[in-house]
Image: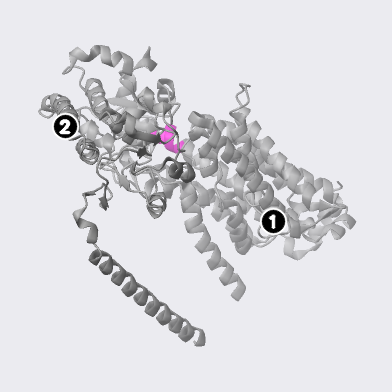
């Protein structure tokens, strides 16, 4: 009994402390809004929902994600890039840029490069973003959730870097290519079921790029009603759903082959396996929210609806090298 | 080793006789295991039980088992017979192996904290698995042989650190085990870092799981695990005598050092082979022996078989939960074993203290 009262007292103390802390925190937030004195400077809202004050015409840009590097290059900002992360390998010229490390970048090297703008994706952790900002760097996060979001990112980077015209032209070009696919697939009644894998038994769930792309390409994602964006699904679910098409990624993260897929227990009963409709797609174009995401959309459309896009047969040949 | 004095030693001690009640508990556990295997085979994301997409009916499962499945989609038969059944059987084997290894370790070292993971066997075995990818030899049993070798290596190191001047220094056991285990884990992590494309093969052995189960893995795991388990069961009387202490055991005619070495080799065999097919799965080897000790007492002649069955029961249910709780998404089985195992273990500890 005595112990219980003691515990209760302790709990009460805890409660008071937590409430006090909350009040302090709230005051901090409110005063933060009051000090919004730099509002007249150019501000943008990035994909993390943060308002960032960006410099006019940045000349020393650092990219911490391959997708961001690709956007910078397509906008013709090659000479403004002072450094990239280790994974930035496209286009070829990105490999010659100064490297600042992988998932955990080398902050000393970053500071030595004196960037006036750091662009990151959601692969860079919040802790690293905060740490860079504490050192006085301006960080903008590009983390789109849809193909539409990638095009918005291109426009946003164009706006920040004074390349609005180039961004507008590229965005319109990409939108036309998307339109060319979706205008055909949208009206299709026949929508084959697709299992799209980026890692053995790991696939794209609702709200992910992969799911978005399959729907736009005129297919049905068998993992569309799973609980998470990138779920690890059970083999029996794949066999039970019996997809007409299986597509898996090839690239850095995987060693999967067509034979691996065929040899998985139970997979011999799947229509895609029986009808030889196992295809590959480059991991980089599918998983990077870069302009090449539209290449991924086109390839998926050719794989899912070969009858609608016959002119693209040559394209299909290079995206299924494993079948030869 | 002379077996006669051992028989008298255990025979004269009433506590170490298998009594009727314990026999019933054992029979009950075996029946529960059979029921569990059947129930777990019924459960999965495609039904009939436990999934959000219950497309396979009980009728279909019945037809599949009596081989009249023509009217059901071909995939259903594969799901039940080629995917779930081997997975449940692999969980049975791995659960047996981890629990029997844990019981043996706790007996040999007379330490309630001993289990294959804490002693470093599992980490040694997963290092063996990682190393096997870099060996240019192709052989069918390469993987389990490598994990066995890794497990044996870590047991050898730990044993020699703990065994000073013909005596086991139990207080050094946990420290050496943790040191050796983290050393091997560090090498495995380094190999993963360097492995590039092979990355996902390696991460499997660190995270653990039964999702790679197939009939091939069941066939390969079954013989070494069953042999090792039977070997350990054969020495259950010796384990009882070891509990009395090294000197009394010596007077009773048990060659303590040899028995301990043989048991450690068997333990490395079962735990090493288990890791080859399931990676590192924590908690099964640690808590199953304790639960069974509370149920059936400390006599290894009944404690060991009870642990074998108990470990299988625990791991089958943990794995079934792991693949159905968020169906069709799978979660790592280690989350379930720790999430269910730890509170249950604490409950048992509190209860047995009050008694």
State which chain disc 1 sits on.
Answer: B
Q: Would you say A235 lies left or right of A291 here?
A: right
Q: Are marks 2 and 1 in contact (CB under 8 Å)?
A: no
Main secondary structure along the magenta-highlighted residues: helix
Residue A267's spot in the image, x, y percent?
Answer: 38, 27
Q: Would you say B235 lies left or right of A199 here?
A: right
Give residue A185's mark.
none
Inspect this view and state whether residue A308 appears: yes
Q: Out of B181 and A43, give the one closest to the viewer.
A: A43
Give residue B174's mark.
1
State which quarter of the image contains the C terminus of chain B. bottom right
Q: Verify whether residue B80 appears in magenta.
A: yes
Q: Which residues are magenta?
A: B79-85
Q: Out of A310 and B27, give the one closest to the viewer.
A: A310
Query: Residue, x 60% and y 24% (percent of image)?
Result: B140
Kindly identify which residue carries mark 2: A165
Q: Residue furthest bottom?
A: A2
Please tell me how crowded label 2 is: few (under 14), some (14-19), or many (20+) other residues with Cα within 10 Å.
Answer: few
Residue A172 lies in what quarter of the image? top left
Residue B338's spot in the image, x, y percent?
Answer: 51, 55
Residue B258 lies in what quarter of the image? top right
């Amino acid at each position: 009994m005595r112990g219980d009262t003691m515990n209760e007292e302790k709990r009460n103390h805890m409660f008071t402390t937590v409430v006090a802390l909350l009040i302090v925190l709230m005051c901090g937030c409110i005063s933060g809004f009051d000090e919004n004195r730099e509002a007249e400077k150019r501000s943008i809202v990035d994909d993390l929902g943060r308002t960032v004050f960006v410099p006019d015409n940045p000349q020393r840009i650092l990219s911490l994600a391959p997708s961001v590097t690709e956007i910078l290059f397509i906008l013709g900002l090659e000479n403004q890039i002072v450094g990239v992360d280790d994974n930035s390998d496209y286009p070829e010229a990105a490999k010659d840029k100064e490297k600042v490390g992988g998932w955990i970048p080398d902050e000393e090297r970053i500071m030595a490069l004196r960037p006036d703008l750091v662009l990151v994706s959601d692969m860079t952790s919040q802790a690293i973003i905060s740490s860079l900002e504490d050192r006085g760097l301006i960080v903008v996060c590009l983390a789109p959730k849809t193909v539409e979001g990638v095009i918005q990112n291109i426009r946003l980077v164009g706006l920040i870097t004074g390349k609005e015209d180039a961004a507008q032209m590229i965005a319109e070009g990409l939108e036309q290519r998307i339109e060319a696919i979706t205008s055909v697939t949208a009206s299709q009644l026949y929508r084959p079921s697709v299992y799209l894998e980026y890692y053995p038994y790991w696939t794209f769930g609702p709200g992910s790029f992969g799911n978005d792309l399959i729907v736009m390409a005129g297919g049905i994602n068998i993992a569309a009603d799973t609980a998470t964006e990138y779920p690890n699904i059970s083999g029996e679910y794949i066999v039970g759903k019996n997809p007409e098409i299986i597509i898996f990624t090839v690239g850095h993260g995987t060693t999967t082959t067509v034979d691996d897929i065929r040899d998985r227990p139970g997979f011999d009963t799947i229509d895609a396996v029986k009808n030889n409709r196992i295809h590959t797609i480059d991991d980089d174009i599918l998983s990077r929210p870069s302009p090449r995401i539209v290449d991924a959309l086109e390839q998926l459309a050719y794989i899912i609806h070969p009858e609608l896009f016959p002119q693209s047969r040559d394209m299909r040949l290079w995206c299924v090298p494993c079948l030869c | 080793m002379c077996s006669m004095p051992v028989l008298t030693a255990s025979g004269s001690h009433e506590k170490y006789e298998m009594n009727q009640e314990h026999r019933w508990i054992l029979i009950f556990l075996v029946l529960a295991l059979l029921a569990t295997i059947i129930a777990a085979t019924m459960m999965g994301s495609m039904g009939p039980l436990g999934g959000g997409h219950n497309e396979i009916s009980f009728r279909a499962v019945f037809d599949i088992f009596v081989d009249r499945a023509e009217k059901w989609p071909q995939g259903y038969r594969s799901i039940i017979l080629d995917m779930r059944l081997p997975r449940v059987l692999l969980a049975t084997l791995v659960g047996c192996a981890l629990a029997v290894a844990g019981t043996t370790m706790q007996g040999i070292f007379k330490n309630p904290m001993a289990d294959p993971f804490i002693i470093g066997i599992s980490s040694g075995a997963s290092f063996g698995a990682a190393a096997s990818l870099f060996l240019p030899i192709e052989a069918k049993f390469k993987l389990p042989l490598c994990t066995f070798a890794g497990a044996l290596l870590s047991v050898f190191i730990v044993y020699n650190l703990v065994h000073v001047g013909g005596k086991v220094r139990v207080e050094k056991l946990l420290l050496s085990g943790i040191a050796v285990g983290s050393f091997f884990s560090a090498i495995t992590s380094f190999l993963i870092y360097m492995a590039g494309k092979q990355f996902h093969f390696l991460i499997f052995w660190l995270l653990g799981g039964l999702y790679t189960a197939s009939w091939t893995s069941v066939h390969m795991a079954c013989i070494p695990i069953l042999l090792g388990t039977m070997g350990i069961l054969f020495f259950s009387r010796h384990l009882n005598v070891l509990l009395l202490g090294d000197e009394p055991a010596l007077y009773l005619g048990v060659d303590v050092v040899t028995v301990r070495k043989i048991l450690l080799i068997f333990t490395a065999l079962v735990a090493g082979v288990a890791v080859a097919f399931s990676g590192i799965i924590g908690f099964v080897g640690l808590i199953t022996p304790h639960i069974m000790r509370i149920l059936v007492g400390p006599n290894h002649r009944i404690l060991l078989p009870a642990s074998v069955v108990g470990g299988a029961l625990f791991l089958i249910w943990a794995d079934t939960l792991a693949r159905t709780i968020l169906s069709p998404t799978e979660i790592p089985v280690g989350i379930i074993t720790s999430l269910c195992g730890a509170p249950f273990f604490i409950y048992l500890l509190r209860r047995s203290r009050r008694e």
